[in-house]
Amino acid sequence: MFIDEARIRITSGGGGNGCMAFRREKFVPRGGPSGGDGGRGGDIIMEASERHNTLVHFRFNPEYKAQRGRHGEGSNCTGKEGESIILKVPVGTMVYDEITGALVHDFRDANERIIIAKGGRGGRGNARFATATHQAPRECEAGFPAEERALRLELKLLADVGLVGFPNVGKSTLISRVSAARPKIADYPFTTLQPNLGVVAVGELRDEISYVIADIPGLIEGASEGAGLGIQFLRHIERTRLLAHLIDVSDASGRTDPVKDYDIIVGELEKFGAGLELKPAILIASKIDVANPEKLEKLKKFAKRKNMELYPISAVTGEGIEAVKWAMARKVEEVRRAPVVVIDDDDSDHFETVAPVKKKAAPAEKKKAASVRKTAPVKKKVAPTKKKAASEKKKTTPVKKKTAVKKKTAVAKKKTAVAKRKAVIAKKKTKSATVKKVVLAKKKAAGRKR
């Protein structure tokens, strides 16, 4: 089951309360306060994983709660920290706040990890409040509360090429021929009910070019208003670098004008409001093994007029498959090498690729610059005279003398300080010797009296 949207509620762990305790133990007359701090609560962590490709595991388990921290105990024992919870999401998941609608994080890279809800800090025990003037504190702190959030997860698949077109034009058949993907293929419309991904590789091992191709469910006229499967799946090609428009040129579809088919698809992409109609695109004429020559000729004239590349293919016979594979690879490589400029509009946000342009200077400006360089005066360095050199020497010599005098005075001060200390120690020794003699004399006198 492919689930690309889910709503979850998460709660981090609250902090443990601090403990109020006093140490009462034998042979410890002054035990004092011994209340420990509370443990820290567990976090809710989200991590992008390449092993997941859908949000189905959040659909049936929408609530997650981390473990709270344990309360502090006596003997200055800190409470145990709560265990954190790690939630694995597919690469390309966007996390929104359900209440405010703000984007919390966009997981674009594998193994990317963030703390989505932080655990509460543990409260302080009464041992933390002991001071010299407050030696028996009876206050302690409660643990900090947990963080609770309601989130909306939205998955946007990361692909290089997106296949768009009417239902039953051969998108699933094409992806099965160019990659190892095996989507459901049948002769009725809306066979594809969920996006499919495939990896395409062209060229030899050393110069191999690989890219990811995405097949999304078919679009029909009025899809932006809810007709057919709607346009909800178009979010999966928002991040693609290239769009491939598949147009059926056979009579099996029942539609007579291939140009009108293209205009309808482009109109639906424009109504989606993500700048999809501005992305680089190529045209693919499918089912040429049973093609209507008039349709094919009309589509060729339209592509020439629009200056677009057209590739006729037949997924059944394999005609044109290699050519379209290489064409998509070249286009993808061009877009990868070009820098990306973000354009922020009021209605939609989209990306445009703009190649760097080097500005050429006008010939008149070049001549002016050359003349300025020639006429600019050159400043020469003048060597110092003998008088200046002598004055500089005089300035430097007193500085050296001052530093030498300072060093000598510092050494003399240290010597006098050492001599004073020695004198003080000698006085103390003499005093202690005299005191000992007096004490011994008193003891002898007392013994004689007895």
Image: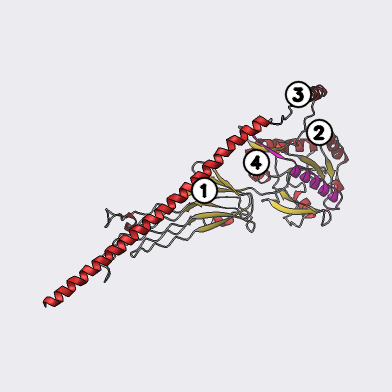
Q: Looking at the image, can residue 243 be seen?
A: no
Measured from the top left, where is residue 13 in percent x and y? 44, 56
| Disc 1 versus disc 3: nearer the observer | 3
- As helix, strand or loop, the secondary structure at mark 3 comes to loop
| Disc 3 versus disc 4: nearer the observer | 3
Going by the numbered disc 3, the residue's amino acid type is Pro
Disc 2 versus disc 3: distance between alpha carbons? 58 Å
Going by the numbered disc 4, the residue's amino acid type is Ala
Disc 1 versus disc 3: distance between alpha carbons? 69 Å
Q: Residues within 10 Å of mark 3 (few under 14, many from 20)?
A: few
| Point 34% across, 56% down: residue | 128
| Point 26% across, 71% down: residue | 27
Q: Choose between 115 and 178: the one closer to the eye.
A: 115
Residue range (magenta) = 316-343
The residue that mark 4 highlights is 227
- As helix, strand or loop, the secondary structure at mark 4 comes to loop
